Amino acid sequence: MTKWFSVMEIEKVTGIPNALVRGYIRNHGRHLILKKKHKDFLIASDSVNVVESIYLLYTNGMNTEQVEKCLEEIIVPKTAAVTDENGNTLQDLNEAVIEQVYEQNLLNQRQKQAVDEKLKKRDEKLTTVLRRKKHIEEKPGFFKRLFNKS
């Protein structure tokens, strides 16, 4: 089982200041196995030597791009599962969000169809009422017919 270290524990184990470790996570986190717990990152014991390598590369005068290039050549890419405090991986969360968006789109389509049907029925009723009114207005009333005859 993998042991996880906080940034402060990494500082105690390696002697690398925690501010630098946080910068390494920010700039080169894709090469590290990380887990986020609340606002802090936990680093897997397998990645401690990578943090030390990054520190050595920077102390040898390399810049961020050179260190990144060097890490890409040295380290075999790993797929790291970043998890939240509930144990959900980002991929699980992403899939859940995609599923919810899909369901919401289906619901929106159904609601739009229902609204369109109601509007169509309302329009039909309205046109029927308008036709009746027009027909009644065109037909002269009884007294008009009676008194307009000459």
Image: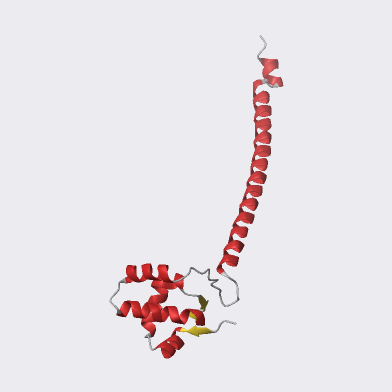
Q: Position of residue 100 (x, y in %)?
A: 62, 59
Work out whether residue 126 or residue 22 is closer to the camera in this orientation and state it. Answer: 22
Identify whether 17 is placed above or below 94: below
Q: Position of residue 35 (x, y in %)?
A: 52, 76
Colour scheme shown? secondary structure
Apparent side of residue 88 relative to residue 9 in the rendered image (left or right): right
Query: Is residue 14 visible in this depiction of the protein?
Result: yes
Quarter that holds the C terminus: top right
Q: Position of residue 40 (x, y in %)?
A: 47, 80
Q: Position of residue 122 (x, y in %)?
A: 66, 39
Identify whether 67 is placed above or below 105: below
- Most extreme residue toward the left is 61
Quarter that holds the N terminus: bottom right
Total marks in image = 0
Query: Is residue 44 visible in this depiction of the protein?
Result: no
- Most extreme residue toward the top is 150
Work out whether residue 7 or residue 47 is closer to the camera in this orientation and state it. Answer: 47
Q: Residue at x 65, y 24 (%)?
A: 137
Q: Residue at x 47, y 74 (%)?
A: 32
Identify whether 110 is placed above or below 40: above
Work out whether residue 33 or residue 59 is closer to the camera in this orientation and state it. Answer: 59
Q: Residue at x 64, y 55 (%)?
A: 103
Work out whether residue 14 or residue 72 is closer to the camera in this orientation and state it. Answer: 72
Residue 54 placement: quadrant: bottom left
